[in-house]
Image: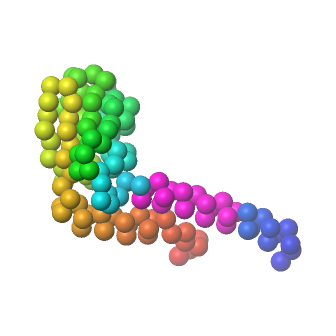
C-alpha cells in the first residue's frame, strides 16, 4: 500500500469519525439530564401554513423552571398544532397547560428517566461507524 493511499484513507476515516462524533454530540444535547432544555424539543415538527416546520421556527422557546419549557408561538392560532406536534414527538411524556398565548410543557422527571437511558443507548449505537459489509 502506498503512502498516498494511506494518507487519503486516513483523511476519509477522520472525516467520517468527526461527523459521527458531532452527530451524537448534537443528539445527546436533547437527552434530559437534571433540567429541561429547549434542545429536548429540537426534533418536534409542527403542521403550520400547509407544511411541517420545526417548532423553533414558529415559536419562542424558553425554560423558566427546571422541569418546564414554555413555547410561545409567533401566531397564536398555532397553539393546538404545537401541542399536537410535541405529543407526537418522542417527548410525549409531557403534560400541557394551555394558556391563551403560550403552551407550558411540564417535563415529568421520573417518566423520562427510563426513556433518557434507552435513548442514550440508541444515540450511541447510531453514532458508531461500521465498516462496509458489517
Residue for point 18% across, 55% down: 108
Query: Which corner quadrant of the image does residue 100 belong to?
Result: top left
Residue that extends furthest to the front in the rendered view of this protein: 65
- From the viewer's perspective, is residue 74 above or below residue 71? above
Return the x and y of residue 16 as percentages of the image width and height.
62, 62
- From the viewer's perspective, is residue 81 above or below residue 32? above
Is any part of residue 23 visible from this angle? yes
Query: Which corner quadrant of the image does residue 61 belong to?
Result: top left
Check residue 87 for magenta coloring. no
Q: Is residue 6 left or right of residue 116?
A: right
- From the viewer's perspective, is residue 19 above or below residue 7? above
Is any part of residue 53 visible from this angle? no
- From the viewer's perspective, is residue 58 above or below residue 88? above
98 or 133, nearer to the observer: 98
Q: Is residue 32 left or right of residue 26?
A: left
Q: Is residue 97 left or right of residue 14?
A: left
Return the x and y of residue 119 as percentages of the image width and height.
33, 64
Residue for point 27% across, 30% down: 72
Secondary structure character of the magenta stretch overall: helix
Check the image and tell me how it is coloured: rainbow
**Quarter occupied by the N terminus:** bottom right
Return the x and y of residue 83 as percentages of the image width and height.
20, 38
Return the x and y of residue 48 as percentages of the image width and height.
30, 28
Residue for point 54% across, 62% down: 21
Residue for point 44% across, 69% down: 125
Q: Is residue 37 left or right of residue 128?
A: left
User: Which segment is the magenta one?
Assistant: 12-28
Query: Which corner quadrant of the image does residue 9 belong to?
Result: bottom right
Amino acid at each position: 500500500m502506498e503512502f498516498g493511499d494511506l494518507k487519503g484513507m486516513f483523511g476519509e476515516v477522520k472525516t467520517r469519525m468527526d461527523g459521527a462524533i458531532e452527530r451524537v454530540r448534537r443528539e445527546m444535547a436533547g437527552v434530559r439530564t437534571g433540567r429541561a432544555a429547549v434542545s429536548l424539543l429540537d426534533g418536534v415538527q409542527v403542521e403550520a401554513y400547509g407544511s411541517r416546520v420545526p417548532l423553533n421556527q414558529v415559536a419562542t422557546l424558553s425554560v423558566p423552571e427546571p422541569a418546564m419549557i414554555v413555547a410561545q408561538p409567533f401566531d397564536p392560532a398555532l397553539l393546538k398544532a404545537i401541542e399536537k406536534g410535541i405529543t407526537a414527538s418522542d417527548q410525549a411524556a409531557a403534560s400541557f397547560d394551555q394558556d391563551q398565548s403560550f403552551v407550558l410543557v411540564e417535563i415529568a422527571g421520573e417518566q423520562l428517566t427510563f426513556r433518557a437511558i434507552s435513548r442514550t443507548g440508541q444515540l450511541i449505537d447510531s453514532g458508531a461507524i461500521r465498516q462496509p459489509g458489517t
